[in-house]
Image: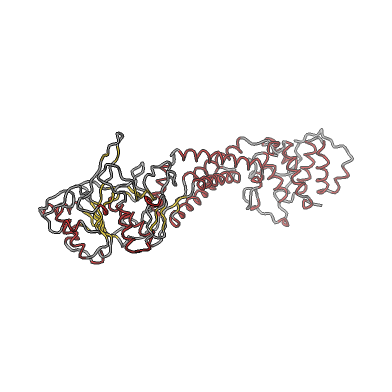
Amino acid sequence: MSLEDLNDSDIETLRKFLQLSGRAAPDRRRALCIEIGINAEDLSAIWLLPPNDFAVELIYLLQTRRLENSVYKLCEELKSAFRGGGYAPQLDAIAYKLNPNHNLELNSEPDYSTSITQPPTQYSNQFTQLPPESGVTEATLPGRRKGIHLSLLRRSNLKTVFTASLTITVALVGLRFFGVFEWLELKTFDHFIQLRPDEGIDKRLLIVKITDDDILAQDKRGEKGQGSLRDPSLNRLLQILEQHKPRLIGIDLYRPFSADSNIPDFLKRLGQNNIIAVCKVPIIDEQGNPQKEVDPPKEVSTDNISFSDFVSDTDDTVRRHLMFQDWVPGAKCRAEESFSFMLARRYLEQELKENSNYQDTLTYGNNLQLGDVVFPKVQPFTGGYQDVDAAGFQVLLNYRATSSGEVAKELTLEDILNNNFQDEDVRDKIILIGSYAEQQGANDRWSTPYGTLNGVMVHAHMISQVVSAVLNKRPLLSVWSQGGEILWIWSWSLIGGVLASYWRSFKPLVIAVGCGFLVLYITCWVSFAVASVWIPLIPPALGLVGTSFVVIYIVSFFPRSPKQSM
């Protein structure tokens, strides 16, 4: 007979009795090794485990090493520990399977007076010299072998992992709800935006920028008027552009003053249906009075007036696209549609004609549809946002991926006036006119994931997002439900606990958790870059790290007694 004759019940009996005997306690392990004839130094891989796990691993090791004599001695020592008692028949049955001559000794009363801690004259060398037929290698040593660690199957460890991961998850979700991680999550959003592969510029757009040099050139020509783009230059600009038949022209410049009626055909040009102008919706102060309003240009049809407002986050970065907002009673700027969305919608209506299927949120409720695309409305709790102001109709701004943040070709005012451009630069394009001046005129620069961009460039990103989503099926940014995000955070907390149950030493655990974080990071980045799904990174990463170190702290400094683990 041999170890192969032992069944699972026998192994479980040995494990249970070894735990109950207290011989697996750290201060009694060296004596146990002497008693069963193995070298204590060869148990370094499992020496620091809690008593419950040490018992499991020791018996597993004796099995894999086929140390029948040591298992037999273990049975005898356990009988001695319990002074025979009611456990003796079970231990005798196991011992008989290992040594058929064992029954000859059953009639004699064992001498329990001998000290169990007296060492034999020498160690047995059977532990360090493996039988060649066993097929056991160093790869099967605890801590090195493949497969699931036996201690993972123990109810005490599973309960610790479950409780710790659930507690950490609840704490993280609570902190996240109160916005503790919002700044970090939004910075992660910016990081993922920057890491996406370059898509190139959107060739349907052209930006005509008004620079400081353009303003000086107007001054040299003796042009009079207000703003960074004087009426004579604006009239010449529109006249030249008209010759090359652009699809739409958007003027992202405030003109709360009357146009010069002495310039031939200027008023007529401003009133054309393909000219889109802007005004600024007022901000209501605490007394209910409108502030910082900018009136629309009088010469442009009210149907072609849009608002130019952006919504920015607490760090003043633009990450959302405000498409609609309610007009303020009593305000002169009564635009409900944003500058960028009006230009994108008009362009798509010309492209798709009767297939545009336009449904605005003001008429049809919460959904906004263009073509086959339904735009998901930002809610107060969306992705990393926690109780954000979601007034109006906003979507997450999926910036076009470019290395510099520039989404469209740019020409200066003087380039156009001097005909330094090609016909294809303008024909059938959406033309955006905006200020790039830094020394003169109003500052129109905004913080974005790509750094600081001019306002007209941000509008270009917004137009490109809408047009590309409808015509090119470029995905819009989306997020998981709150329940899905909570399960995601809990899953990574559980993984951290499982890793801590498997790797009990600090250095291997740090490496394992580091690898886990790498997998989490790559998963979040691929989801963002490929599927345009923004899933949480910061809370699950904290759950992974936090749970792993909480679990290893508990099992290392608060080991359960044998009775508690059964």
* Residue toward you, 431 or 357: 357
Vertical arrangement, residue 470 with respect to residue 298, above or below: below
Choose top left, top right, bottom left or bottom right for residue 304. bottom left
Q: Number of marks in the image?
A: 0
> In the image, is 328 to the left or to the right of 186?
left
Vertical arrangement, residue 303 with respect to residue 26, above or below: below
* Scheme of image coloration: secondary structure
* Residue toward you, 423 or 438: 423
Looking at the rendered image, the quarter that the C terminus falls into is: top right
Furthest residue toward left: 222
Residue 181 coordinates in the image, percent (x, y): 44, 41
* Residue toward you, 329 or 449: 329
Q: Which residue is drawn at 41% across and 48% down?
A: 378
Choose top left, top right, bottom left or bottom right for residue 53. top right
Residue 339 coordinates in the image, percent (x, y): 29, 52
Q: Which residue is drawn at 60% across and 35% down?
A: 557
Q: Is any part of residue 231 visible from this angle?
A: yes
Residue 20 coordinates in the image, percent (x, y): 73, 37
Choose top left, top right, bottom left or bottom right for residue 266. bottom left
Furthest residue toward bottom: 423
Q: Is any part of residue 405 visible from this angle?
A: no
* Residue toward you, 502 or 497: 497
> In the image, is 244 to the left or to the right of 539?
left
